[in-house]
Amino acid sequence: MSGRTVTARSLSPARNEQSTLQRLNGLIGEVAESNEFQRDRLDGVVLHSLDDLRQIRPVDKDDLLRDQQAHPPFGRNLTYPRDRYVHLHQTSGTAGSTLRVLDTEEDWDWWRGCLHDVFAAAGVGPADLVALAYSFGPYVQFWASYEGAGAVGANRIALGGMDSVQRLETIREYSATTLVCTPSYAVRLATVADQKGLEDAMSSVTRIICTGEPGASLPAVRSQIESLWGARCFDHAGLSEVGAFGYPCAAGGGVHVNEREFVAEIVAPGTEDRVAAGDVGELIVTAIGRRGFPAIRYRTGDVVECCEDRCPAGHTDRWLPGGILGRTDDMVVIRGMNVFPSAIEQVLREFDELGEFRITFYTEPTAMDEVKVEVELSQPGQGRAIQARLRTRLGLRVRIVPLKPGILPTYIGKVRRVVDMRQAPSGHETRDRISR
Ligand SMILES: [Zn+2]
């Protein structure tokens, strides 16, 4: 692995379209020649502007999964012979949806550079000690974050293989300044600190860098984490099969697309039609610098708001004010309205003292689709207030089922708080799916 000079480049210089096009055409030429999965869609493509990317048919995770099932275990999205690859990661997912991703040493350097930008944007530097609360597993998140924190010169401690108490004790012992974890785990760890009398372990932590699930850009989630920890909360965005395409905006919240390394388009889900400013849509991303396992016009499944304004600090990279709002496959149509579970979650988190919750979509005997929220309440009467706020904010009628604290399971890591039990229109098949 090559070293990276910490101050080698400033954060996210404005994108130079000519050099981006040159890099993209070089990528497309090389990939079309030797990558069997990509060849048909890239053959003969030469870009004269970034808009020309639209000549290329988008692909999504299902396309990659089908290819890996047909050509196990790694599929054909490989530009080089197998012996060039030195990193193997898997995506988390249910059986049959686990994607395997290979990286060359050069691509791993590229990953490190992208994560460098994430940590630099959050203000992490050589004076910091970064604690990474992930298991030491096959998911890229821990490994790439570890590299990125090192790239800005910070010291790092991996908290894999520890329970929450051991993690808090380790943070305290080394006075870690920065915690990296999922937003739900940040809340969970603060709860454990409170229960076990380990609040002093939280005092050295000045920032929390979240990833792995939507939420850390939602104002209510962010302010909950910030007030629990007395620290700043930053979000970032990425996918194993694409790269770390979003870094946090310290000034305005949300994330910026790293346009030095990625081209982003926002389209109406399931289409290639770009959405207008103010609308939400699906992010299609092209990774400019990833060659061994390319991501060219990749449908991320991430739902973002299309914003054409600069962030409050005037940064030039495209700003996604709410970060990742949800996933396209989480989007549920209820009585003609697009509903994102993350939007319901945001409203719930605005109420103090709420415990765990579970959102269920179901079909009434009248064939009407409905939403039920089971939620652990500490004060009677809160249920009505939650219902009213969901009604005003989302225009959604929701049934609230109040529960005593401790009844629902505590979720850690990738949350599973959404159950979809609606009947398919045929009336026979249940959409038996647990999202996220
Ligand atoms: Zn910004």
Image (cartoon, rainbow, N blue to C red):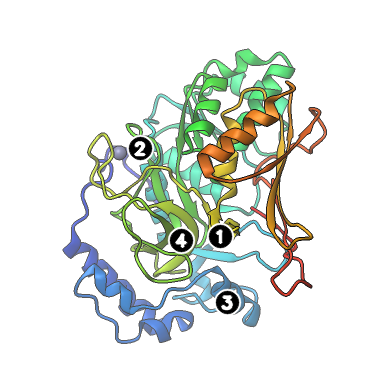
Using the image, determine if residue 199 lies above or below residue 386.
above
Q: Position of residue 399 (x, y in %)?
A: 71, 42
Query: CA–CA distance between discs 4 and 3?
Result: 16 Å
Q: Tell me the element at label 4.
A: loop
Quarter where residue 127 is shown: top left
Badge 2 or badge 3: first in the primary sequence: 3
Q: Which residue is mark 2?
A: 249
Query: CA–CA distance between discs 1 and 2?
Result: 34 Å
Q: Which residue is mark 3?
A: 75
Q: Which mark is residue 336?
A: 1
Mark 4 packing: few (<14 Cα in 10 Å), some, or many (20+)? many
Front residue of 263 and 306? 306
Quarter where residue 329 is shown: bottom right
Q: Which mark is residue 326?
A: none
Mark 2 packing: few (<14 Cα in 10 Å), some, or many (20+)? many
- The amino acid type found where label 3 is placed reads Gly
Query: Which mark is nearer the camera, 4 or 3?
Result: 4
Front residue of 386 and 204? 386
Query: CA–CA distance between discs 2 and 3?
Result: 36 Å
Residue visible at 60% across and 40% down in the picture: 345
* Discs 2, 4 touching: Cβ within 8 Å: no
Front residue of 313 and 267? 267
Front residue of 304 and 21? 304
Q: Which residue is mark 4?
A: 242
Can residue 181 be seen from the camera position used here? no
Query: Which mark is nearer the camera, 2 or 3?
Result: 2
Mark 3 packing: few (<14 Cα in 10 Å), some, or many (20+)? some
Q: Position of residue 180 (x, y in %)?
A: 53, 35
Badge 4 or badge 3: first in the primary sequence: 3
Badge 1 or badge 2: first in the primary sequence: 2
